[in-house]
Image (tube, rainbow, N blue to C red):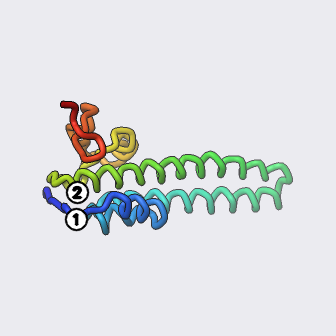
Amino acid sequence: MAFRKPDADPMVAALLTFFVFGLGHMITNGQKRKFYVNLIAIGVYIGLVVLIFGASCLGTMIIPFCGCLNIIIFPIALVMMVFGVFSTIEAYKTAEALKAGKEIEENEYFFPLFHKIVAFADKTATLNPDAAAGNSDTPSNPPAA
């Protein structure tokens, strides 16, 4: 289902997405599916941290050298930070396209790298043709004359 939302504000979308687990995708851009993708990613992250931390604490009680499992938490946290930044960029680019009056789909992506990450798990994710070609005629990147 394609829709337009010319009142979308790129800065509000980016800030909401960065600080409130992807909320800018749903509130500002009207894309619930992207919000749910963020919630699932956060849930998996929290689950992994709890599982690893729990295994680490239990391991140190049984075998003193199992505390090294905490080393795994840092790379997972780093991956989630990158995911959050990419999601924020995606929310901003989508809001720019909406503000420019473009009609977009519910699960359409404008940031190719984030699309590749999400498409790994969500086969219905589509990349905007302009973004795929490296073209952007949104207000911040006007076409060359």
Instruction: For label 2, count other residues whose C-alpha is less than 10 Å away and answer few (under 14), some (14-19) or many (20+).
Output: many
Instruction: Please give the count of numbered marks on the rendered protein.
Output: 2
Residue, disc 1:
7
- In this rendering, is residue 54 above or below 69? below
Residue drawn 22% across and 65% down?
Answer: 7
Residue 72 visible here = yes
Badge 2 vs badge 1, beta-carbon distance below 8 Å: yes
2 or 1: tag closer to the N-terminus: 1
Instruction: Say what secondary structure mark 2 lies in.
Output: helix
Residue drawn 24% across and 45% down?
Answer: 138
- In this rendering, is residue 20 above or below 99? below
Q: Quadrant of residue 130?
A: top left
Instruction: For label 1, count other residues whose C-alpha is less than 10 Å away and answer few (under 14), some (14-19) or many (20+).
Output: some
Residue situated furthest right in the rendering: 64
Residue drawn 14% across and 53% down?
Answer: 103
Q: Quadrant of residue 22?
A: bottom left
* Quadrant location, the C terminus: top left
Label annotation for residue 104: none
Distance from label 2 to label 1 (Cα)? 6 Å
Residue, disc 2:
99
Badge 2 amino acid: Lys
Where in the figure is residue 33, as x and y percent of width and height?
30, 60
119 sits to left or right of 129:
right
Residue 39 visible here = no
Badge 1 amino acid: Asp
Where in the figure is residue 61, as x and y percent of width and height?
83, 61
Where in the figure is residue 118, as x and y percent of width and height?
37, 47
Residue drawn 25% across and 47% down?
Answer: 139
Instruction: Say what secondary structure mark 1 lies in.
Output: loop
* Quadrant location, the N terminus: bottom left
Nearer-the-camera pick, 76 or 67: 76
Where in the figure is residue 141, as x and y percent of width and height?
28, 40
